[in-house]
Amino acid sequence: MQANPRSLDTLFNSQLRYVVPMFQRLYVWKESPQWSTLWEDVSEKAQLLMRGVKSNPHYLGALIIEGVKPNSPREVKRFLIIDGQQRLTTLQLLFCAYRDIARANEWKTLDRTTTRYLENADADVMEKPDEELFKLWPTTLNRDAFRSVVSAGSPEEVSKRHPLVYLPRKRKPEPRSNLAEGYLYFSKMISAWIDASAAEFSKTREEAAFALLQSLQQDFCVVEISLSEGDDSQEIFYSLNSQGQPLTQSDLLRSLIFMRAEKEQIDRDEIFAEYWSKFETDFWSMDVRRGGRTYSRLDLGLRFFLMAKTGQMVDARRVNEEYRRWVSAHPPRYATVKDELADFTRHGEAYQRYESAIPSELPCTDLRRVLMDFDVSTALPLVMFLELEAGLDAEQSKDCLDAVESFIARRVLAGEETKEYNKLFVDVIGSLRGLSGDAVLPALRKKLLEGGGTTRHWPTDGEVVEKAISRPVFKMIKTPALRLILERLETALRNKKTENLDIPAGLQIEHVLPQKWDAHWPLKGVSIPANVALYPHLAQGELAPLADAVRTRNSTLQTLGNLTLLNRYLNPAASNGSFESKLVEYRNSVLRLNRHFDAATAWDEEAIAKRGKALGEAICKIWPRPTVPEKSES
C-alpha cells in the first residue's frame, strides 16, 4: 500500500480512468453540506490567489484505488475506487461545469485544459471508446445520468435533459438526479464568482476564470492510497465502513460479491444486469419493521436466505459478517460468483413472491395469504427451505407446507404465543438439513410434534374443538386471520354439487347473536336493559341473579360458533335485529356457512356451542395434525 499526495491536475491529467465498482452505492452528495462546503473552500482559495496571498494546499481527503490488469493492450489504464467515489464524482461535476462555461465564452485554453480532466484522448484506438473516453466511470445505475450531464455541453441542455417534474397538487418538484443538480449548482456558483471577482479585482472575466482554475490545480490535493497486489481491498473497504455503520447489510453483501467478481475477471455489467439489477428496485429498498427495528427488504431477504441455507439464527445486525463466514467455507459453497448470484436471486424471487402478495387478491387457500393474514413472516425461511433446498417434488412440497400451515393455524385459533417463532422455524430447518425427498415430511412432523409449552405446542384435535367452543376469538384474533379461518370453513363446507363460485373479497364478519343484543334478544325470558347488557355488574334487584348469565352471553357471542360471513350489503341489513329478521337476510347469502341457519328456529348459547363444536371439528379436518410422532429415515 502506497500513500502519496496528488494535486487535482496530477489526478486527472493522465490517460487513465477511475471505475466505481458495482458494490459502491449511488452518488448521494447534496448541496448541504457537501457541495456548499467544497465550494466555500474553492472560492476562498481562489480569492487568496487573486490577492497574491500564498496558502497551504487544502486536502480533500483520501482516495483509495486498486489497479486492475488490462484485458487488452488497447484498454485505457483502469483503477477501481475502493473509497472516495463521492468526492471524485463531485470534482468531475465541478470541472464539467467549469468547462462548459469556458466553452460558452470561447476561452479555448481553459476549455482544452478542463476537457483533459474529463475525457481521455484518442478514442479511436480504445478497446471500448464509449466507456473508456471518460476519466470517471460510475456505477451502473449512475452511468446514464453521468454521461448525459458530461456530454450536454451547457446548463440549459442539462436542464432540458433532466427537467423538473411537478406532479398534480404538489408544490415541490419531484427529485431529479443528484448528478444533474450538482452540475447545475457548480455552474451557478462558478458563473457568479467569475463575475463578482472580475469586478472586484478589475480583471477580465477570462482572467478571473483562469485564477479559479489555477487554484483548483495547485491548491487542492487528495491523498491517493494505491493498493498493492497483496492488499485485501475487501477488508480495507469493510474497515473504512465499520464505524457508524454507514452501509446497510445488503450494501456490504454487494461489495463482497462484486469485489470477488473483479478478482475472477467476470463481466461485472453482465452479472449486474442478469442478477443484481433485480434487487435495485423500490420493492427491495423499502423499509419494513420487524421486531421493533427497521430494515430494508433486501437486508431481510438476505437474512432469510442465510437462515434457509444454514438452519441457524442470524442476527439482523450482523448478516453480512455471517454471510462472509458461511460463503468462505472450504470447500467453497459456489464454484463461481455467477452461481452464487443465481442462487441468491432464486431465493430472492421466492421471498418477493410471498412478501409482495396482496391478501385481498388471493384465495384463502393460498399459502402467501395464510402467512400474511396470520402475520407469521418468521416462517418464510422454513418455507424457502422446503421449496428450494429440500429436494422435494411438487406433491412432497405441498404435504410439508400443509403441515407447517396446520401448525400455524391451530396455534392461531388456540391463542398460543408467537414470540419464539423465528427460533422455532430455524430450528426446524436445522433438523431437516441433510434430508431430502420422502424423508423430509416425517422428520418435519416429528420435529413440530416434539414442541411443548405455549411457544411450540401443536394443538390437538380436542384442544382445537375446545377453543372453537369457548375462546372469544372475535376479541382475541385479528380480523384478517379470523376472516381467513371462516373462509376456509366455507371452502370446506362445499362439495362437488356446490357451484364453483369464488369467495368474494371484502366479506365482513357477522355476529349472529349481535354484540348489541339487549333490544331483541331476551335472556332467560327477561329483557335486559342496554346498560346491564354492557356492564353486568350494574344488575340490581330482579336482574341481579342474571349478571353471570349476561357475562356468559357476552363472552359466548364472541366465539367461533356465533360468527359467520356476509357481504357489505347484508351485514348492515342484518345488524342488531332479531334472529327472525336475520334469517330473512341470511337467505340472500350463497355461502354454505349461512345455510346452517336455514333449519334453525332459535339461537342461544347452547346453539352457539353446538355450532362451535362442529366448526372446530371441521377445522381439524382442514388443518390435520398427526397423532403420534412418525419415524424419520436416517
Image (cartoon, helix red, strand yellow):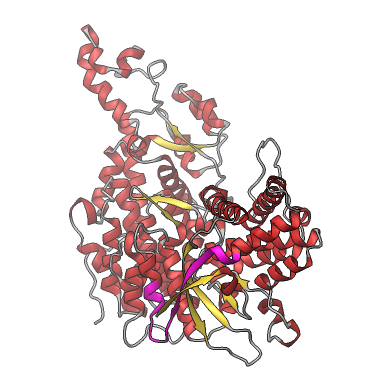
* Above or below, comparing residue 561 to residue 386 in the picture: above
Q: In this view, does 576 lie to the left or right of 316?
A: right
Figure quadrant of residue 170: top right
Q: Position of residue 607 (x, y in %)?
A: 34, 33
Q: Is residue 548 left or right of residue 233?
A: left
Q: Position of residue 577 (x, y in %)?
A: 47, 21
* Above or below, comparing residue 429 to residue 247 in the picture: below
The magenta span reads: 217-236
Look at the image and say whether residue 164 sits in the magenta stretch: no
Residue nearest the observer in this picture, 298 or 469: 298
| Residue visible at 66% across and 90% down in the picture | 74
Whether residue 289 is visible here, answered yes or no, is yes
Whether residue 383 is visible here, answered yes or no, is no
Residue nearest the observer in this picture, 31 or 191: 191
* Above or below, comparing residue 608 to residue 532 in the picture: below
Residue nearest the observer in this picture, 416 or 504: 416
Figure quadrant of residue 102: bottom right
Q: Position of residue 35 (x, y in %)?
A: 56, 53
Q: In which quarter of the image is the N terminus?
A: bottom left
Q: Residue furthest front?
A: 52
| Residue visible at 36% across and 36% down in the picture | 474
| Residue visible at 44% across and 51% down in the picture | 288
Residue nearest the observer in this picture, 594 or 62: 62
How many marks the image carries: the answer is: 0
